[in-house]
Amino acid sequence: MRRLLLLLSLLLTTNAYALVQINESIKTHVFSQCETKEKIDTLNKSPVLLKIPRLLQSNVPNYPRRATRLFMEGGVLVEFDVDERGKVINPKVIWSENKIFNLTALKNASSSVYKPVLENGKTILYKGHKQETFFSMVDEQDMLNLGKKFDNLVLEIQYGLKEGKSAKYFIRRVEKTVKKIDSLLAREDLDKLTRAGLLYLKATCLYKIKAPNEEIKNLLIESKQHYVEEIVQSERGEYFVSSVTSMKLKTFGGILLGQMYLDESNWEKAEKELSGAILASIRMSGTDLPIGLKRQKIYQAYLQLGIASYYQQKWCLASKSWEKAKLLANGYPMTFPEQLTEPLEYSQSKNWWE
């Protein structure tokens, strides 16, 4: 098992491919069936189901050409009402990270069709429904929109990773990059998100030169404290929104921090970080079956989540995580570890009998 964990490394690459994602609600558990089981076990009662309009039809909005050309990303939150026939009325943008995406998000929301809410056997007007749309460049985990200095630091690391470079050369180059990061972190005028990004980048640098886990872990924990989340007032109360950059940091920083806890056999904290990372990925990309580099990283996260859950005897979460990892491995140069086949079968049998 230890050998497996050491093989799960994080890579720095880029790939310019546009992705548009639409979210109507935010998941609070990686696997809803496991959440339901846990709630029933804990509270001995069925979970309460909220009555909201259900999306029946929606077109994938086009990524604005100018935004694609300039590698721009952003999130948009649209609020609207759903009438008795399931049509969208009164759409309006209540939060936007970048106005270049507003019109596209509004047009998409307006063209969506919903199954209206039933009350006492009759369809009713539902006010204040929200649709969150993320426009992000697939696999651009290091394109965090934090300025040219950050981008240059990433390029330095990538150059050091090129074939033909010796290990000593790479270590010297990474150590030089870390010093530059430290000089930027010493500035008092940094905004919170830039500081979070630099701390994450420093953690990945130290991880690559095999620095002590505690040092890497402390950097990632500090980075989390600077994630930016805004509160938007809506028709139905407060709604928390995050930028694309924040969501990327939550995903990739959470995966690395989860691995640190896994190395320490701190199963509970590993589960929490890995679950949070996967949920951030799902929220941003809208799927638990991503493509490209992100697929490899989420595959690793599901493997690790399964391990953390298995050692806590959370059979539902363990089995579902490993099943998802096997699904992600299909058709890609990834193979589900043979060492986990028996634990998977055991957790499946325990989950079936519960």
Image (cartoon, rainbow, N blue to C red):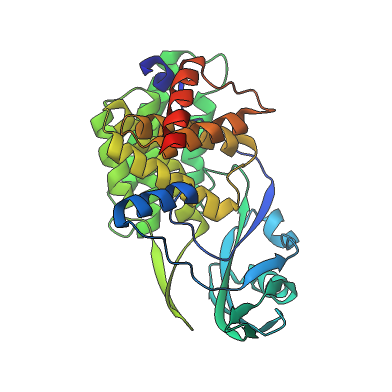
Horizontally, is 199 left or right of 131 in the view?
A: left
Image position of 334 with respect to 316: above or below = above
Picture quadrant of residue 200: top left
Q: Give the percent coordinates (x, y) of residue 123.
A: 65, 83
Residue at the spot 66% in from the left edge and 67% down from the top edge: 55
Looking at the rendered structure, the number of numbered marks drawn on it comes to: 0
Image position of 136 with respect to 81: above or below = above
Res 132 seen here: yes
Picture quadrant of residue 89: bottom right
Q: Give the percent coordinates (x, y) of residue 199.
A: 34, 44
Res 195 seen here: no
Residue at the spot 46% in from the left edge and 39% down from the top edge: 153
Horizontally, is 298 left or right of 88 in the view?
A: left
Question: Which part of the image, by quadrant, shows the C terminus?
Answer: top left
Horizontally, is 232 left or right of 333 in the view?
A: left
Question: Given the current orientation, which residue lies at the most extreme front position?
Answer: 353
Question: Which part of the image, by quadrant, shows the N terminus?
Answer: top left
In depth, the one of 73 and 289 nearer the eye is: 289
Q: Give the percent coordinates (x, y) of residue 320.
A: 50, 37
Residue at the spot 31% in from the left edge and 26% down from the top edge: 263
In depth, the one of 86 and 109 nearer the eye is: 86
Q: Give the percent coordinates (x, y) of residue 77.
A: 56, 71
